[in-house]
Image (cartoon, helix red, strand yellow):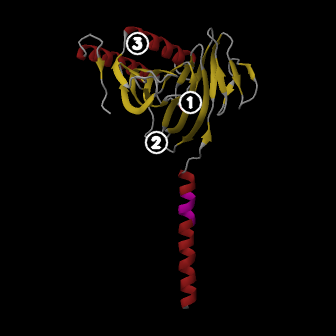
Amino acid sequence: MKLTECIGTRMAAWAAVLVVAGCAGTVGAANVEQGWATARVIDGNPVFSKGGGPWQKLEKSVTIHVGDVIKTDDKSHVDLSLNYNNGAVQVAPGSEVSFDKLSYRLMPLGDIEHDTEINLRVGILYGIVHRMTKASKYEVKTPRGVASIRGTRYRISAKGDIVVLSGTVVASMYTTNPDGTQGPIKTYSVNAGFSSSAAAGDVHGSTTGDINDTTNGTNDAMSHGGVAQGLDPGGNLANQQDQQQQQQQQQQQQGNQESAGGTGENISPTF
């Protein structure tokens, strides 16, 4: 065989290998898809805006996309399933929420990698978030800062105050100086059974009232938002795992109360 023919044959063989490898990489790659939220339960007369458009009445089963805004009056609330973006939320009365990111990828082994970003402009948001892949993100923005959420049942206000029933929330919030001016940003973790005050930048044991309110709000979001009925394809957990999470939450709360001596004293975070 001539030298040129030999070189040509080897180059063709290497090209074939590269094509096969490229095809395998394409098959293994997961495309980023745009997610959506679904209004499962409507109480009262909430309204929403599609991408900055005029306000219109929010009806059951309406899909909410990135850029849409939901607003509730003092007698309204909305329970939504986040579908592939993990879990469910309740927009409490007197609140305004927009969805800044709702993207996801269906990974080859069946996991769902998602990027969820909710902007709580006014009011209160309750949420339940299941187990997440390491690459997934779930954040709630407020006028004071950002809360990064991992596998959690939570309540967060637009003031940046947080209550956690299970899991952990890492918050980076502006504090308030004694003279009322804006203080420095503090970053701290809020674990199960604890709450935080953004203005003071402290973490303390949750009161019974906060625990009960957050339990009711997240239970409502979980059942009406579709998680308990298996309507949440992004949850990645079966109902049995939900029950285990609730049991762990109760055990953590009991342990926290015992360690605090039942006094409700503030427990300062480590910054």
Residue found at x 52% / y 43%: 107
Say which label, 3 or 1, has the lower sequence index.
1
Q: Residue furthest front?
A: 179
Q: In terms of secondary structure, where does tag 2 sit?
A: loop
Q: Residue tagged by mark 1?
A: 118
Span highlighted in magenta in the image: 19-24
Near mark 2 (Cα within 10 A), the count class, few <14, some 14-19 or many ≥20, is: few
* Label 1 residue SS: strand
Image coords of residue 43 (percent x, y): 64, 10
Asked which quadrant contains residue 71, the reply is top right
Pointer 1 or 2: first along the chain: 1
- Disc with the residue nearer the chain's start (3 vs 2): 2
Q: Identify which residue is drawn at 56% across, 39% down.
A: 104
Q: Amino acid at mark 2?
A: Ala
**Could you give the CA–CA distance between mark 1 and mark 2, rounded to whole angstroms?**
18 Å
- The Cα atoms of the two marked residues, 3 and 2, are separated by 30 Å
Q: Amino acid at mark 1?
A: Ile
Of 141 and 143, nearer the camera is 143
The answer to whether residue 191 shows anywhere in this view is: no
Q: Which label was assigned to residue 211?
A: 3
* Three-letter code for the amino acid on which mark 3 is drawn: Ile
Image location (x, y in percent) of residue 95: 59, 18
**Residue depth check, mark 1 versus mark 2: number of the one nearer the observer:** 1
Which residue in the protein does label 2 denote? 135
